[in-house]
Image: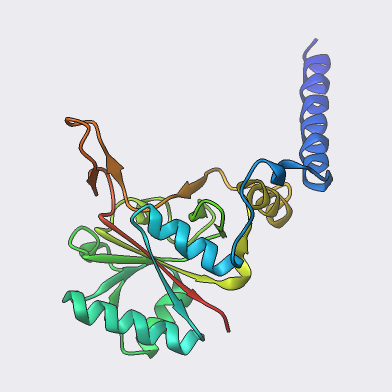
Amino acid sequence: MQSSSRKDILKRIASATQRRLAFVEKPSDYKNIYKPILPDIITCFKNELEAINGQCILCESEFDLYLKIKELILSKGISYVFCRDSRISISLKSNDIPTSSEIVDFENMQAGITACEFLIARTGSVVVSSKSESGRQMNIFPPVHIVIAHASQLVEYPEDAYIAIQKKYRDTLPSSISTISGPSRTADIEKTLVLGAHGPKEFIVFLYKE
C-alpha cells in the first residue's frame, strides 16, 4: 500500500514538472491584453514606475551608477547604506560609499540596497526572489529601498518575467517570488493614500545600460 502511494506521489511530481516546462516553452498571445511598450522598454519602465510614486534613475554605465548613488546618499544625509549582496557591497566600498552588512546596523539603517531578478516595463514593477543574498527582509524593512538593475533584466510584460524566472531556475525555483510596485502604500484610513505605511517610504531603481 505504501509503495503504491509513493509511486502515485512521484507520478504527480513528474507530471507537474512537465506542465511547468511546457508552460515555459509554449507561445502565448497574452500581449494582446496589454498596451504596447512605448516609446521604448527603458522609458516605458521609468514612466510606469514614476506613475506609482517610485523613482527610476538612468545611468550610462556601472561607474555612472555608483557615482549617482553616492550623490543621492549625500543629498539625503544618509550616513551609510545597508547591503547584504556581496558583489554590490564590494562595488560600494570601492566607490567610497559607506556601507554595512552587520546585524547591529540593520535596525538603524536609513537605506538598503538590493539586486533584483527582473524589471517589468509595462507595470513598472521589480521582480525579486528568495534566491537573492539580500533575503526577504531587505525588500520591506529599509525606509529607502534602492534597487540596482541592468537594462538586460528588463522584460516587457508580467508573463515574460514569470517565464524568464522558470527558464533561469528550472527545477530549483525560489521558495518566494514577489513583485514590488513602488513604495509601500495604504488607503485604509479615510481613503487617504499614505506612503510607507507597511514598508519603504521611498523606492528607487538605478538602471544602468553598460
Which quadrant holds the N terminus? top right
Q: Nearer the viewer, residue 108 or 205?
A: 205
In the rendered structure, the answer to whether residue 96 lies left or right of residue 42 reads left
- Which image quadrant for residue 134? bottom left
Q: Which residue is drawn at 22% across and 64% down?
A: 109
How are the colours assigned in the image? Answer: rainbow
Q: How many marks?
A: 0
In the rendered structure, the answer to whether residue 166 lies left or right of residue 144 reads right
In the rendered structure, the answer to whether residue 66 lies left or right of residue 96 reads right
Q: Nearer the viewer, residue 192 or 209?
A: 192
Is 76 drawn above or below residue 52 in the view shown? below
Is 122 drawn above or below residue 5 in the view shown? below
Q: Where is residue 139 in the image (x, y as percent from the top left)?
A: 38, 54
Q: Where is residue 77 in the image (x, y as percent from the top left)?
A: 16, 76
Q: Which residue is drawn at 41% across and 50% down?
A: 136
Which quadrant holds the C terminus? bottom right
- Which image quadrant for residue 104? bottom left
Q: Which residue is drawn at 77% across and 42% down?
A: 29
Q: Position of residue 106 (x, y in %)?
A: 25, 61
Q: Position of residue 79 (x, y in %)?
A: 18, 76
- Which image quadrant for residue 64? bottom left
Is 109 drawn above or below residue 58 in the view shown? above
In the image, farthest residue toward the top: 1
In the rendered structure, the answer to whether residue 184 lies left or right of residue 9 reads left
